[in-house]
Amino acid sequence: MLALWHLRGVSRPPLVAGTAHAVVGAVGLGLLLLALGGPARGVAAGVGSFGAVAAGLFTVALLTGFGLLLLQRKGVVMAIHAGIAITGFVMVMAWVALG
């Protein structure tokens, strides 16, 4: 949703939307960390480490998101944030699907 605002040319989306985005991301990261504490999955398919790597990527995406807020920057930092988060999402989907 925030990407759509950005693509439509809105200078800054409402702070409430960004805060909700951050909260959902942080809760998702917490749930992923809980899932990583459970039994091993995906080892036979070769994706056993994808969950841990995705958690690291989501952590970096969360930090770059806070950097966007604090530095009030767009452009390159936003592209980095989105790229890292999308990569983490794809890795989680592979870990879940093949695990």
Image (cartoon, rainbow, N blue to C red):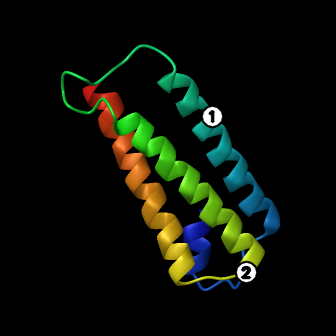
Please tell me how many numbered marks the rendered image carries: 2
Residue 9, percent across and down?
Answer: 60, 86
Q: Amino acid at mark 1?
A: Gly
Q: CA distance from mark 1 to mark 2?
A: 26 Å
Residue at the spot x=55%, y=58% of the render? Answer: 61
Under tag 2, what secondary structure?
Answer: loop
Numbered badge on residue 72: 2
Amino acid type of disc 2? Gln
Q: Is residue 33 above or below residue 23?
A: above
Q: Pick whichever, 28 or 48, lies toward us.
A: 48
Residue at image position (59%, 40%) is 29
**In this rendering, position of residue 19 left or right of residue 76:** right
Question: Which residue appears farthest toward the left when viewing the image?
Answer: 45
Image quarter hosting the C terminus: top left
* Along the viewing direction, whichever of 73 and 5 lies nearer the viewer: 73
Residue 15, picture quadrant: bottom right
- The location of residue 17, given as percent across then percent down, is 74, 61
Identify the residue at horizontal 77%, vertical 57% (top origin). 19
> Image point 74% across, 71% down: which residue?
69
Q: Is residue 31 left or right of residue 16?
A: left
Q: Which residue is mark 1?
A: 30
Q: Is residue 80 left or right of residue 11?
A: left
Q: Residue 4 placed where, x, y %?
A: 55, 71
- Is 30 rendered above or below residue 84? above
Which image quadrant: the N terminus?
bottom right
Query: Which residue is most to the top?
Result: 39
- Judging depth in this view, the residue of 91 and 56 nearest the camera is 56
Q: Earlier in the sequence, mark 1 or mark 2?
A: 1
